[in-house]
Image (cartoon, rainbow, N blue to C red):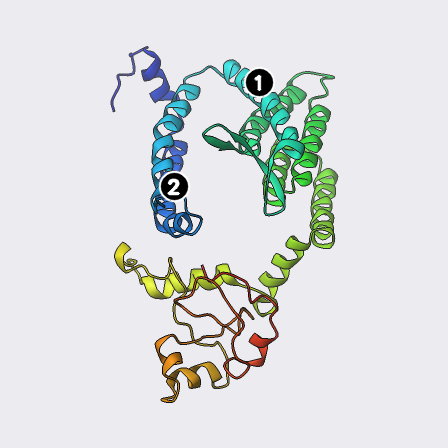
Amino acid sequence: MSFARTDRSLVAQWWWTIDRWSIAALAIIIGFGALLIMASSPAVALRIHAGGLHPDDLFFVKRYFAVLPASLALMFVVSLQTPRMVRRIALVGFVISLVLLAYTLFGGVEIKGARRWIELPGLSLQPSEFVKPCFAVVCAWLFSQYRLRENFPGHWIAMLLYLTVVTLLIKQPDLGQTALVSVVWFTQFFLAGLRLYWVAAGMASGVVGLVGAYITLPHVASRIDRFLDPASGDSYQVDRSMDAFMNGGLWAAARAKARSRNRCPTRTPISSSPSPARSLASSPASSSSRSSPLSCSAASRGCCRRPTSSSCSPPPASSCSSGCRRSSTWHRPCI
């Protein structure tokens, strides 16, 4: 694409004023998103029977590429607007998305204990994803007016909006979005001239909030414990990631050979002592175990798994280590 400097058309002005590094970063993010959804979503689509009676392993891939052109077009149209119009769009979008965010608390769909989605005909909507960009633009405008206009309480209004958004996100609960919104808002406030003692207070509040989440939210405590000590509980996601790295190699495996993403591979115990499961699998007297070997991950303290089974079940007491037998999570699916 090439335009003369003297070209005063709308697209030419856009081309000469747009942040090229931001465009490049967005292109990289879109590319990585496409790569990851093509690599990881087929197994999930088959597991949840996406597509109805005839499950389609490319269900999410097709939806991703179906909405991608519309998303790029919308981004292009918004980037053509003047700063004043962008602020107006952000303000209207923020008000609408904030109302929808509040609606999720009593009218949203509960998934795994959290209410973050709104079911609409033909699609599902997560209002918090619309709150984030609109909130960032509105707060940036408030902070700029706070610095430019005397006696304008832009920072206090931004604080009130921040507390409102964070309260609604915690009520869902969605700690990840809360942390992301907090970091963006705090960075904006810092760049707007936040005093150092307020910086210290904000950092202290973040630590207190993390400790409070650890105490009051069991799933947060479980994730932190497993991050600090993988042997303290289930590390299913980490195990699957390691399987992908070990089996895929430097240039990854072909789609037809990528078996780790679809089922549990044959695993060996991560243990310093010989594994009873390995002995059982290699024993000539155990023909059934040889055809479908059991394996036990001492790192995850998970259940013994049959690679060809769709769910986990309690193994014989002699087939796994004591650490595996202690687990109460026999029902956890293998994929």
Cα separation between marks 2 and 1? 35 Å
Residue 14 screen position, x and y as percent: 37, 19
Viewer-closest of 255 and 224: 255
Which of the labelled discs sits on residue 119, or is there none? Answer: none
- Secondary structure type for disc 1: helix
Residue topped by disc 2: 51
Q: Is residue 303 above or below residue 31?
A: below
Viewer-closest of 333 and 240: 333
Which mark is first along the chain, 1 or 2?
2
Q: Amino acid at mark 2?
A: Gly
Viewer-closest of 143 and 259: 259
Kindly check if marks 2 and 1 are in contact, taking CB atoms under 8 A apart as contact.
no
Q: Quadrant of residue 78?
A: top left
- Secondary structure type for disc 2: loop
Which residue is found at the position 54% from the left and 34% from the top?
A: 126
Residue topped by disc 1: 92
Foreground mark, 2 or 1, reads 2
Q: Quadrant of residue 278?
A: bottom left
Residue 230 screen position, x and y as percent: 57, 66
Q: Amino acid at mark 1?
A: Val
Q: Is residue 164 above or below residue 39?
A: above
Viewer-closest of 106 and 216: 106
Left or right of 239 on screen, residue 36: left
If the image is split into quadrants, where does the C terminus sit? bottom left
Residue 138 screen position, x and y as percent: 60, 23
Q: Is residue 275 visible?
A: no
How many residues crowd mark 1 within 10 Å: few (<14), some (14–19), many (20+)? few
Q: Is residue 299 visible?
A: yes
Q: Is residue 159 above or below residue 84?
A: below
Q: Residue furthest front?
A: 53
Q: Is residue 196 above or below residue 210?
A: above
If the image is split into quadrants, where does the N terminus sit? top left
